[in-house]
Amino acid sequence: MSDVAKPLEIIHDSGKHEFSVVVDGHRCEVDYQLDGKVMTITHTGVPSPVGGRGIANLLTRFAVQVAAAQGWKVKPACSYAALWFERNPEYRHLLAP
């Protein structure tokens, strides 16, 4: 048996405007709205049984990187996303005015 952790497979469902991953049977997600070229992150959810593992960080980073690749700006409407931008100043140039 390997001690190496399997990388998380984050899925972007652009039709539902969400990024999600299932960890130990628990669905974690980042929801967003898209208005033109502005992605508004509206919700970040990680169930408590899998909390504290950095899953919200990984999901948010993935979402922001997708936004950057698409040429979008990001508006962090949920409290976690706002905190994430405070903790990751290298992405602040992507913040919507």
Image: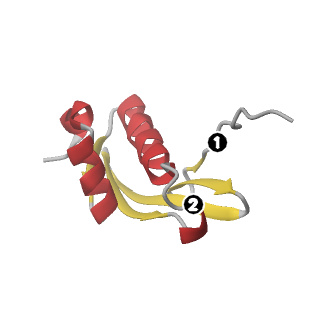
**Neighbour class for label 2 at 10 Å: few (<14), some, many (≥20)?**
many
Mark 2 touching mark 1, by CB under 8 A? no
Alpha carbon distance from label 2 to label 1? 11 Å
Residue 8 in the image, given as x and y percentages of width and height: 64, 42
Tell me which residue sits at (60%, 68%) in the image.
49
| Residue placed under numbered mark 2 in the picture | 28
Q: Secondary structure at mark 1?
A: loop
Tell me which residue sits at (41%, 29%) in the image.
69
Toward the left, the furthest residue is 97
10 shown above or below 17: above
| Residue placed under numbered mark 1 in the picture | 8
Which one is nearer the viewer's eye here, 27 or 51?
51
Residue 66 in the image, given as x and y percentages of width and height: 44, 37
Q: Quadrant of residue 28?
A: bottom right
- In the picture, measured across the screen, residue 88 lies left or right of residue 43, that is left
**Identity of the amino acid at label 1?**
Leu
Residue 55 in the image, given as x and y percentages of width and height: 51, 51
**Identity of the amino acid at label 2?**
Cys
- In the picture, measured across the screen, residue 69 lies left or right of residue 25, that is left
